[in-house]
Amino acid sequence: MDELKASIRHVPDFPKAGILFYDITTLLQKPEGLRAAIDQLSSPFEAAGIDVVVGVESRGFIFGAAVADRIGAGFIPVRKPGKLPAKTVRQTYALEYGTDSLEIHADAVTNGQRVLIVDDLLATGGTAAATADLVKGLGGHVQAFAFLIELVGLDGRKRLGDHQVHSVMKY
């Protein structure tokens, strides 16, 4: 875990003053770091019966697709508005530094599918909760959330209800 943490660059005042950004690109550059991160994200869900992994734009795509492959599930992207080509459903949510919206294809999740939501970072929980709302709105069952990094002091878990939350690293 210490090796993974040491591979992450800290960038102060990004994307705005007062925010400390945890830059995972330095971890992704190292094959052993990328492999270890995917292993740690995937292992709790290998026998969980997950049907699809939902990855949140954009860093959630990196990990979500790899996790889906490892656990034998499909992959669904959740994107910023206007990026998906077919009919979408939108959810607006609060960030720690503003508001944003996410979209999913209206036919991406089928009724009753077991879903794992994957992203790189859990901060205030707004993005993850909005993603869960999109999945639930389409009839999916959120089984768990998996994050590479959790910023514990921001208490984002509270917004995710009683779902299992797996974080590889905590700050």
Image (cartoon, grey):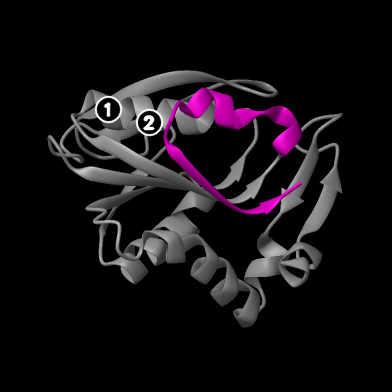
- From this viewpoint, is residue 110 visible? yes
Left of 92 or right of it: where is 8?
right
Residue wearing tag 1: 136
Q: Does the magenta stretch include residue 170?
A: yes
Left or right: 24, with 129 as reference point: right
Residue 127 in the image: above or below residue 93: below
Mark-to-mark CA distance, 1 and 2 = 6 Å
The location of residue 145, given as percent across then percent down, is 45, 43
The crowding category of the residue bearing disc 2, from other C-alpha atoms within 10 Å (few below 14, some 14 to 19, many at least 20), is many
Question: Of the residues shown, which amino acid type is indicated by label 1?
Answer: Lys
Q: Which residue is at a point 43% across and 30% down the rendered structure image?
A: 162
Furthest toward the left, the residue is 111
Q: Which amino acid does label 2 sit on?
A: Ala
Comparing 118 with 23, the one in front is: 118
Magenta segment: does it hold 51? no
Residue range of the region highlighted in magenta in the rendering: 152-171
Image coords of residue 62 (percent x, y) = 48, 60
- Determine the residue positioned at 43% across, 26% down: 130
Residue lying at 71% horizontally and 37% vertically, measured from the top left: 152
Q: How crowded is mark 1: few (under 14 residues within 10 Å), some or many (20 or more)?
A: some
Rendered image: mark on residue 132? 2
Q: Which residue is drawn at 60% across and 81% down?
A: 31
In front here: 36 or 34? Answer: 36
